[in-house]
Amino acid sequence: MANGQNMWHGVKIADLEGKAVLITGASTGIGAALARAFAAQGASVAIHYNESVDAAGRLLAEVEDAGGKAMLVQGDVSAEGETERVVEDAARHFGRLDGLINNAGGMLGRLATAEMTDAHYQKVMDLNGRSVLAAARAAHPWLRKQGGFIINTTSIAARNGGGNGAILYAAAKGFVSTITRGHAKEFVGDNIRVNAVAPGIISTPFHDRYTDRDMLEAQRKTVPMARVGSPDDCVGAYLFLASPSLSGYITGQIIEVNGGQLMP
């Protein structure tokens, strides 16, 4: 995992230095790669986690050992009021907030529609959808003070309907993609750019938990680049969208990072 940190130490984006950035779902996978990368750019990073206490602690130590600035903030963003508290804790710790990356999410199990319950529906939508809305609402007063960015993590599933048993997750990510475009228009007058990144098949604990080896191999065969992506494969898109010098005239867009699996 340290390789990702080293990769982004060699690339400097000057206008990210000194920024305060909150990354939800940052203890593992794409979120952890982003925490390393933004810290390597000189940003102060709030590493959000929920249950992965040990992983979050190791990541914080890794970032600080490499000379980065970071803090931990815990919270279940699927619970009412917790997302807002996480944003406030991070912003007040740094005294400002320049960027919000809504990365927390999960499938919470592969279920066919006939097997779904209302309780399962609510959990999936709260985690993947409502948390993004709540975080944006809480971050808005901080971001508008000096301008900033929001980057949402959506998914290839938002366009293709998801794999077996993932239809509800796909629908929730469709919500994320749509609200990205809506917030881009709503917040543009406050100098806040809102964009998203849609990863394809990325090797993370998400697939370790929900995708067996045969299914993952079948999915890999649909990727023109013939491999499953890594969290570090996604990082460049987020850094690009965070940097005003690189993407200052870009808002309401979704960057697909999927090895060519989907070419919209």
Image (cartoon, rainbow, N blue to C red):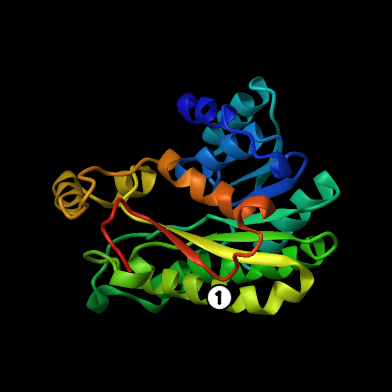
Work out whether residue 2 or residue 165 is closer to the camera in this orientation and state it: 2
Task: Identify whether 13 is placed above or below 118.
Answer: above
Residue 244 rendering spot, x and y as whole percentages? 68, 54
Residue 31 rendering spot, x and y as whole percentages? 52, 45
Residue to which mark 1 is pinned: 181
Residue 140 rendering spot, x and y as whole percentages? 75, 67
Query: Tag 1: residue type?
Result: Arg
Task: Identify the image quadrant of residue 222.
Answer: bottom left
Mark 1 crowdedness (10 Å alpha carbons): few <14, some 14-19, many ≥20: some
Work out whether residue 86 or residue 241 is closer to the camera in this orientation and state it: 241
- Quadrant (top left, top right, bottom left, bottom right) of the C terminus: bottom left
Work out whether residue 117 or residue 27 is closer to the camera in this orientation and state it: 27
Task: Identify the image quadrant of residue 213.
Answer: top left
> Which residue is drawn at the image coordinates 58% and 34% (left, top)?
36
> Which residue is drawn at the image coordinates 52% and 34% (left, top)?
55
Say whether residue 214 is visible: yes
Residue 150 rendering spot, x and y as whole percentages? 64, 61
